[in-house]
Structures are given as C-alpha cells and as structure tokens.
Amino acid sequence: MKAPRRPIQVVAAWLRRQPPKVKAFLAVVSGMVALVFLRMVVHDHDNLFIAAEAVHSIGILVLIYKLMKEKTCAGLSLKSQELTALFLAVRLYCSFVMEYDIHTLLDSTTLITTLWVIYMIRFKLKSSYMADKDNFAIYYVVIPCAALSLIIHPATLHNLFNRICWAFCVYLEAVSVLPQLRVMQNTKIVETFTAHYVFALGIARFLSCAHWVLQVLDTRGRMLTELGYGVWPLMVMLSEIVQTFILADFCYYYVKSVIGGQLVLRLPSGVV
C-alpha cells in the first residue's frame, strides 16, 4: 500500500500537468502575491535592495564553499563570474563618485569574493573547468549593453561619463547570468551547490525588482522622475523585470527538485 502523498506533492504534481500558459499565469499571480506580502511586512523598501545584495553575497559564499570543499569548479561559468565582476566594478566606481553608502560596502565585499572565485577557476581548479560547455560569447551582451548605455542613460546632473557607466552596469547586470544558464543548458544536470548559487541569484533579482516596483507604487510614480527623465527610468524597470524572468524558470525547477528531495537538479530540454 502506497503512503499518502503530502499536500505539497499533490500541488506539484498538478502543476506539472498544466499547459505552459497556465504555468505562466500562475507565476505572474504568485509574483504579485509576493509583492503584496512584501509591501505589508517591509516598511522601508530600501531594505529590499540591501537584502538583494546580501543574498547575492550569500550565493557567492556558497560557491566559495563548493570550491574549497569539493576542489572542483565543474558546472560553473567563468564568463558569468567575469561579467559579474565587471558590472560590480563599474557600479562600485559609480558608488564612489556619485553616492557613497551601504551599497558601496556590500558591492565591495561581493566584488572581492567574485574575484576570488575567478582566480580559483582560472588557476587553482583549471583542470575541472568545463570550457567546452562555457561557450557563450560574452561580446554578444557586453557590446549591446555598452551601445545602449551610450544612447539611453540618466539625465541627471552628474558627469556624462559617470551616467553612461551607471547605465552600463544596470544593463549588464540584467544579462550577466546568461553564460551560467548556457552551461546548465549544455550539461542538463546541475549539482547541488551550483543550483543553490543560481537560486540565490534568482531570489536576489526578485528582491531587487520588488524594491523598484514598490518604490514606484508608494511614490505614485514620482520615483521614476527621481531617476531622471526620458526613457531611462523605464529602462531601469525593464532591466529589473528581465533579470527576474530570466531566472524564474530555473527557480521553479529548483523548488520542485527540493520538494522532491533530489540532491542533483535535472533540467528538461529548453528550460534555460
């Protein structure tokens, strides 16, 4: 006689049977419910942005633990780490010259740990690096982001070069995870620590997106004009939303895998 399934397993089984349009609708509804919940429990929405950066740092610490414990970098994308280091370095520069605050400290910590991960992959654990799987051409994202930042950037009183740098790091952050997703797409199997890291990125992206959305709602749109005028405020919002949706599908399979008690995440074709 089979043991009765837990309610959460019943719900997961029901979700698997639904067509893609229903899953997409439920994902949007879940996101909206999560936003309402955050609006009710978090009074200072700046804390969401700080939490997003903190979760990103935790994700990096998970990678460090993986590299130190397992002595392998298999499944990790060096190119994603390099893109992360690039946008963090540019954002750190902008923090120093435009608005030095707590985000500067958090970005500094995350940049240092990311550089350490890059060092380990490039030199100490080079033999386990899956270069053939990490085949995303990063100029496909760096060049468009640089070109877009020249055209659409903040219309504030800061120096033009600094404003372009600000836009560049916003655009690059939105797509920096794409090489890591390509590695996972090529391998189809994601080991535990890499899955934890990418899931942490997904949570960080959602919290960051929630920060901007709730700020706009609470200020009744005035927050958009504080970011500048023209198309730039909308591009900031679009970048945050793109970041969130890029990782949404992976996060769904990660949660399903955890519920099912699987230690290794197996991705269906076409997920990422």
Image (tube, grey):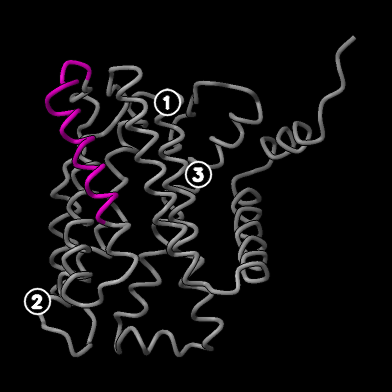
Badge 3 or badge 1: first in the primary sequence: 1
Q: Quadrant location of the C terminus?
A: top left
Residue position for label 3: 249
Marks 3 and 1, how far apart at CA: 14 Å
Identify which residue, 181 or 111, lies in the foreground.
Answer: 111
Note whether 18 is above or below 185 in the view shown: below
Label 3, residues with CA under 10 Å away: few <14, some 14-19, many ≥20:
some
| Amino acid on which disc 3 is placed | Asp
Badge 2 or badge 1: first in the primary sequence: 2
Residue position for label 2: 161
Note whether 158 is above or below 17 in the view shown: below
Residue position for label 1: 190
Which span of residues is magenta-colored?
108-128
Q: Quadrant of residue 148?
A: bottom left
The overriding secondary structure of the stretch rendered in magenta is helix
Marks 3 and 2, how far apart at CA: 36 Å
Judge left or right: residue 90 versus residue 4.
left
Q: Quadrant of residue 189?
A: top left
Q: Is residue 26 magenta?
A: no
* Helix, strand or loop for disc 2: helix
Identify which residue, 231 or 107, lies in the foreground.
Answer: 107
